[in-house]
Amino acid sequence: MQPLSRNEARRLWRAIIEFDMLDKGDRVLIGLSGGKDSLYLAHLLSAVRRYAPMPFELAAVTLDVGFAEVDYSSLHRFCSAREIPFELLYLDMARHILEEGNRQGPCAVCAYFRRGALCRYAAEKGFNKLALAHHHDDAVETFLMSILYSGQIKVFEPVSLMERTGITVIRPLAYFRESNIKASNIFKEIIPLHAGCPVCKDTQRARVKELIKELRRENRSIYDNLSGAMRYGKAITLWPAEPGKGEMLERHRNFYNKYKHDRGLRKG
C-alpha cells in the first residue's frame, strides 16, 4: 500500500489535531459508499493508522439502499489489502427515499437515512466514532446551499456528536479539496462505484457546485471568500430577528400612540 505524501499527511493531521478527531483506543467505523471520496478516506486512515502515536481501530461498512444492483467485491478486496474489516448491509430504502424526496429533496432524505443507519450500526457493534468522507468542497457547497435553499447560515461540523446514539461523527477530509482526491494514485488500483441513484446529476448540490464554478470564472476569490465566511470570528452584520405577529401589532400601536398628540395638533 502506498504511503501518504507529505501534502496528504499535512492536510489529514491538520484536521485530526485542530478538531481533536482521534484519541487512543477509538473504534472508528468508515462509511464506505464505494465512491471516490470514501475510498480515499479509507486509504488515508489505514495509512495513518500505521504510524499514528495513538492506537485506534478501523472497520468499514457499505450500505446498499437498493437503487441498483452493484458488485461490491472490489470494496472487499480494497479493504482486505488495508487490513480493514468490511461488511455490507442491505437496506430497502430506495423507494421511500424518492417518495419522501418529493417534499424534502431526495438527497437530504437519503443522507438522513444513511447517517441514521450508520450510527445505529456503529452503536450496535461497539464503535464510538463514524468517519464520513465529506471534503472541503462539500462544506463550502453545503454552506451556500443552506443560505439559498433554507434561509439559514449553517455548515456541517468537522466533529459532531449524535446525541441519540452517542456516536461522534468525524470528517477527516475537511482540508482536502475535491481536486486533491481526484488526483490520488489509488484510483489506478480501484474504480469508484456508482450507487445507481436516479437523481444524482440533477440535485441542489450539483447546481450549487456549477454556480460556484461559474462565479469563479469571473472572480477567483469566490471560493476562498465562501470558505472564510464559514468561520467564527468573521465580521457578521445581520438584520434583527423577525418579530412575531403579536409583537408587530404591539409595535404598530405604540408607534401611533407615540405621535397621537402631534396628529391632533395638525388636525386643529
Image (cartoon, helix red, strand yellow):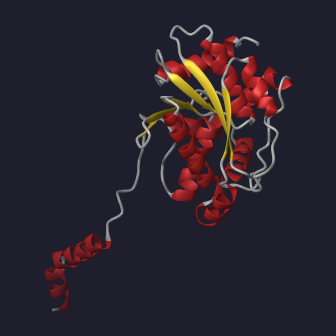
Of residues 50 and 27, the one nearer the viewer is 27
How far from the left and from the top, in percent, is residue 209? 70, 46
Q: Is residue 221 visible?
A: no
Could you tell me which residue is drawn at 47 percent across and 16 percent down? 25
If the image is split into quadrants, where does the N terminus sit? Answer: top right
Q: Is residue 142 left or right of residue 254?
A: right
Q: Is residue 91 left or right of residue 199?
A: left
How far from the left and from the top, in percent, is residue 117? 56, 44
The image quadrant that residue 139 belongs to is: top right
Q: Is residue 88 left or right of residue 253?
A: right
Of residues 103 and 202, the one nearer the viewer is 103
Which residue extends farthest bottom?
268
How far from the left and from the top, in percent, is residue 224? 61, 35
Of residues 174 and 198, the one nearer the viewer is 198
Could you tell me which residue is drawn at 64 percent across and 66 percent down? 102
Q: Report how many numbered discs are placed on residues in the image.
A: 0
The image quadrant that residue 133 belongs to is: top right
Of residues 41 and 243, the one nearer the viewer is 41
Q: Looking at the image, is 32 positioned above or below residue 210?
A: above
How far from the left and from the top, in percent, is residue 94? 69, 56
If the image is split into quadrants, where does the C terminus sit? Answer: bottom left
Could you tell me which residue is drawn at 51 percent across and 29 percent down? 129
Q: Is residue 153 visible?
A: yes
